Amino acid sequence: MERPTRQREHEGTQEQEDTDEQTSRACPECESESITSDGSGELVCEDCGLVIEEENIDRGPEWRAFNHSERQSKSRVGAPTTQTMHDKGLTTTIDWKDKDAYGRSISSKKRSQMHRLRKWQERIRTKDAGERNLQFALSEIDRMASALGVPRSVREVASVIYRRALSEDLIRGRSIEGVATSCLYAACRQEGIPRSLEEVSDVSRVEQKEIGRTYRYVAQELKLKMEPVDPKQYVPRFASELELSEEVQSKANEIIDVTAEQGLLSGKSPTGYAAAAIYAASLLCNEKKTQREVADVAQVTEVTIRNRYQEQIEAMGIH
């Protein structure tokens, strides 16, 4: 057991020596340690300008650009691949502008030809019913995500979940819109972006009951690990829409923490729980909002806020 230990110690010493040699490298001309890479594959001394190494591999493009328009005109790559398009954005598209490579307008004969080519190119992008299904579902996810104002990462996750559901044949017997909406709701929960089932159903063409039923089915079949929604995730958004201060937000979070430790959160709606905490915090911080105002923002009833509010102030020991 002694030899491997010595070997590891020797290797560690060798690596340390190599690292020290790189960090303490000095210029042979002026003995300065200000050695930098100029971005073109050369190591240059900042003090005297001596090129120390020029054989480094430059992994950048061979062209130079000094502003955004030059960079766009010289770049020879397309857009990055994305899961939000049925073909992952790899197909070539014919530009809708009727202009040639030099920016000049093309003749009417060429315009009609380009119109026919665009039409056929759009037709052959989807080769079977599965791709047409995917194209429609991903466009629905993109539309609903834009209406909800969720970031790009949520759209990507929702698209991946829908692709998995399609490959597992979970769409059969269910509407495409229903499965797409449930995938978007699941993605919001996975990414920690708080959107209630009511908010998602408002931008969807499917009833809330069907979305919930389909969501549970998809999550169970795909074994999606979903943690319970934390009411504190809703507090910043609700408080911002009600124009409440940071003090109210901090107090609402404190109320949620204290009462959740006592088990009051179990079996309760997180949106209603957060709304009640905000209402209680606004009263305690002298920034009173009516129950109707809070209920409209949180999309819950005033009765829910009253019930949760009474439970929370009793648990906090406030009279």
Image: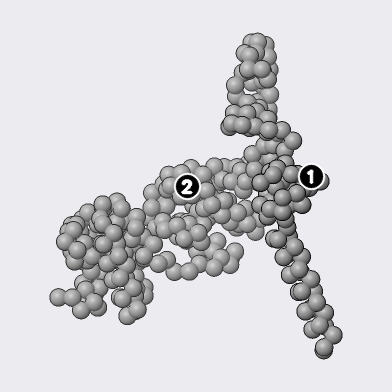
Between 211 and 33, the one lying in front of the other is: 33
Is residue 317 rendered to the left or right of residue 34?
left
Q: Residue furthest bottom?
A: 1
Dot 1 falls on a residue whose secondary structure is loop
Amino acid tagged 1? Glu
Residue 315 pos. (x, y %): 24, 78
The residue under label 1 is 54
**Looking at the image, is mark 2 or mark 1 nearer the viewer?**
1
Q: Quadrant of residue 24?
A: bottom right
Of the 4 image quadrants, the one containing the C terminus is: bottom left
Precedes in sequence: disc 2 or disc 1: 1
Of the 4 image quadrants, the one containing the N terminus is: bottom right
Q: Is residue 88 visible?
A: no
Residue 151 pos. (x, y %): 48, 49
Amino acid tagged 2? Ala
Crowding around mark 1 (Cα neighbors within 10 Å: few <14, some 14 to 19, many 20+) is: few
Residue pictured at 51% horizontal, 61% vertical: 190
Relative to 115, say whether 242 is above or below: below
Residue pictured at 69% horizontal, 40% vertical: 90
Query: How far apart are the two marked residues, 2 and 1, measured between alpha carbons?
Result: 49 Å
Crowding around mark 2 (Cα neighbors within 10 Å: few <14, some 14 to 19, many 20+) is: many
Relative to 310, say whether 216 is above or below: above
Relative to 62, say whether 182 is above or below: below
Dot 2 falls on a residue whose secondary structure is helix
The residue under label 2 is 145
Residue pictured at 56% horizontal, 46% vertical: 137
Residue pictured at 50% horizontal, 64% vertical: 216
